[in-house]
Amino acid sequence: DTAVSQTPKYLVTQMGNDKSIKCEQNLGHDTMYWYKQDSKKFLKIMFSYNNKELIINETVPNRFSPKSPDKAHLNLHINSLELGDSAVYFCASSLSRLAGGQLKQFFGPGTRLTVL
Amino acid sequence: DQQVKQNSPSLSVQEGRISILNCDYTNSMFDYFLWYKKYPAEGPTFLISISSIKDKNEDGRFTVFLNKSAKHLSLHIVPSQPGDSAVYFCAASEGYGQNFVFGPGTRLSVLP
C-alpha cells in the first residue's frame, strides 16, 4: 500500500489555467505538507496543515491554496498558472512534535508541473 | 540566503569505502536535523535524524555527527553500497515549528 500518494504524476498546462494536485496519506499522520522543488533542485516548504489548520505559509503567492477536506488529504489548488510555477511539487506527511512524532516526514512521489 | 548548505554537489566513492556527506547551517536556532535520500522520479525518503542535545546518532550503516559550535553536520555511510547511489538532502528545523529548511542536495555515486 502506498503511504503518501499524489495525482497526477505529470501535469502539462497553459499559462493562466487553474489546476489542482491531490495528495492522500494512509499513515494516520496529523500533519501534511506541500513542497516545491525548483529548477535548482531546492526543496522549499510551501504549506503545512495540522489538524485542518494552516500553520505555515512561506511567502507563497495567494494563487496557491491548500485545501484539506480531512486529515488524510491535502490538495493544492493553483490559480492563474505562470511560467515560473513549473516545478516538481511534493506532498509529505508526519506526526507533529506535539503529538510525539520525531518529525520524520514521508514524501509522495512528486508531481511534475509544466506550464507552457 | 541559504540557511542550509551542502557545498559538494556530487561525490563518488568506491563500493565498500566510507561516504561522508557534509552539511552546514547558519541559523543557530535550528535544533533538529534530518537526512533524506532521493532516487530519481521518487520522493525523498527519511534516512536518519539527530536533535541538538546529541552529537551522534547511529542506525546501521548510517551515522550522523553534529558539531553545534561549527554549525556542521555530516552523514557517514559505512560500507558504501551501489544501492546508496542517490541524492542526499540535509534538512533542519527549529523548536516545535514544522518549518523544514532543506539543503540543495549532494549526489552520491557508489562505484562497484
Image (spheres, coloured by chain):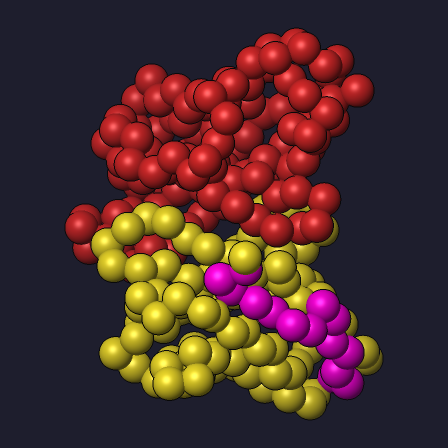
Chain colours: A red, B yellow
Quadrant of the rendered image containing residue B111: bottom right
For the C terminus of chain B, the image quarter is bottom right
- Vertically, is B57 above or below B105? below
Q: Looking at the picture, tell me which residue is in the foreground, A18 or B42.
A: A18
In the shown orientation, is residue B29 left or right of residue B77? left
Disc tally is 0
- Vertically, is B104 above or below B59? above
- Residue furthest to the top in view is A17
Q: Which stretch is magenta?
A: B2-15
Quadrant of the rendered image containing residue B106: bottom right
Q: Looking at the picture, tell me which residue is in the foreground, A89 or B59.
A: A89
How far from the left and from the top, in percent, is residue B54? 30, 81
How far from the left and from the top, in percent, is residue B12? 77, 78
Q: Is residue B75 magenta?
A: no
- Vertically, is B96 above or below A12? below
Q: Looking at the picture, tell me which residue is in the foreground, B38 or A18.
A: A18
In the shown orientation, is residue B33 left or right of residue B79? left
Residue B47 visible, this orientation:
no
What residue sits 51% from the left and 74% below the top?
A: B24
Residue A34 visible, this orientation:
yes
For the N terminus of chain B, the image quarter is bottom right
Q: Is residue B4 magenta?
A: yes
What residue sits 57% from the left and 67% below the top?
A: B5
How far from the left and from the top, in percent, is residue B99? 37, 49
How far from the left and from the top, in percent, is residue B27? 39, 66
What residue sits 39% from the left and 26% below the top?
A: A73
In the shown orientation, is residue A29 left or right of residue B1? left
- Residue furthest to the bottom in view is B17
What residue sits 25% from the left and 78% below the top?
A: B53
